[in-house]
Image (tube, helix red, strand yellow):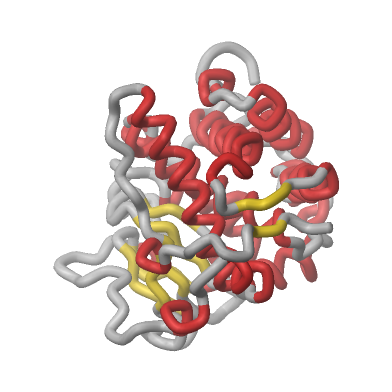
Amino acid sequence: MQVRFRRNAPLDTGQVRDARGRGVGAAVGGGGLGLVGLIIYILISVLSNGGGAAGLPPQLAPLDGQQIGQADTPGEIDQNCKTGQDANERTDCRIVAVVNSVQKFWAGVFQRSNRQYENSKTVFFTGQTDTGCGTADSQVGPFYCPRDKLVYIDLGFFDDLQSRFGVGNSAFVQAYVIAHEYGHHVQDQQGRLDKLGGNQTGPESLSVRTELQADCYAGVWAAHAVETQLVEQLTQADINDGLDAAAAIGDDRIQQQTQGQVNPETWTHGSSEQRRRWFSRGYEQGRPAVCDTFTGSI
């Protein structure tokens, strides 16, 4: 059994902008960043809030004075994604349900600390889209942009993840990816991303520590997902899928597969073992406080 959503649970499609089919043009050619861009490059290029344009590739150069991520007309999700049953049947509705669940969980965490959680919308796009961090094409993979505080994803990413890196395209793999990106949004509200800037790489770098904390935050959400009243059940098989996904996109495994060698000094996301361990830590202990990747060894 895969992660299931409560059949009659209402979905809030207002937390997602469906901009599919309304891209700004053809995807950037010439090979692009590919899926490796997500794993190796996206943090230092897109999540660096104060890094300026110097560290950004051409297709992610900052945009000035443009409306970002705005849908002109209602997308498919408004008509098709009404309840948890829809989430059990359609990938786009499933992502809506996960976004709803993740944000409901973090809103509760912030409220218990007498803080206000600010929702972030997820933007569905195809091909290419304008973001607060510049023009992103689908090859970059899912990411959170702190400049406009939105999560961006081309849903075709999950097929790429399966075909290129052997990661199963299960419901919980999709949920893990989304929960990880919202972990960055939580970090943004905590002021963590303000400390990033420049091309920080290496096994103990701020980039790696930031990514591992987002993995841990994804695990914390998973530990409480059923409590949000959207997720009906999570099985050990679901968690195993998440662990396998975390391991598959470790810097060491990606480098070995794509380059034939491993160079820890260029890591930005952490090793397979680290990503599995920090996701597990969050899931097993279920408290954001255990996700301090910025103190001591990781």
The part of the image, by quadrant, that contains residue 270 is top right
Residue drawn at 79 percent across, 70 percent down: 163
| The one of 231 and 22 positioned closer to us in this rendering | 231
* Residue 68 image offset from top left, x and y in percent: 27, 69
Residue drawn at 32 percent across, 44 percent down: 49
Q: Is residue 253 above or below residue 115?
A: below
* Residue 155 image offset from top left, x and y in percent: 58, 72
* Residue 8 image offset from top left, x and y in percent: 57, 64
Q: Is residue 202 above or below residue 78?
A: above
Residue drawn at 47 percent across, 64 percent down: 11
Q: Is residue 257 above or below residue 236?
A: below
Residue drawn at 30 percent across, 44 percent down: 118
- Camera sees residue 37: yes
The answer to whether residue 256 is left or right of residue 40 is right
- Camera sees residue 59: no
The answer to whether residue 186 is left or right of residue 276 is left
Residue placed furthest toward the front: 8
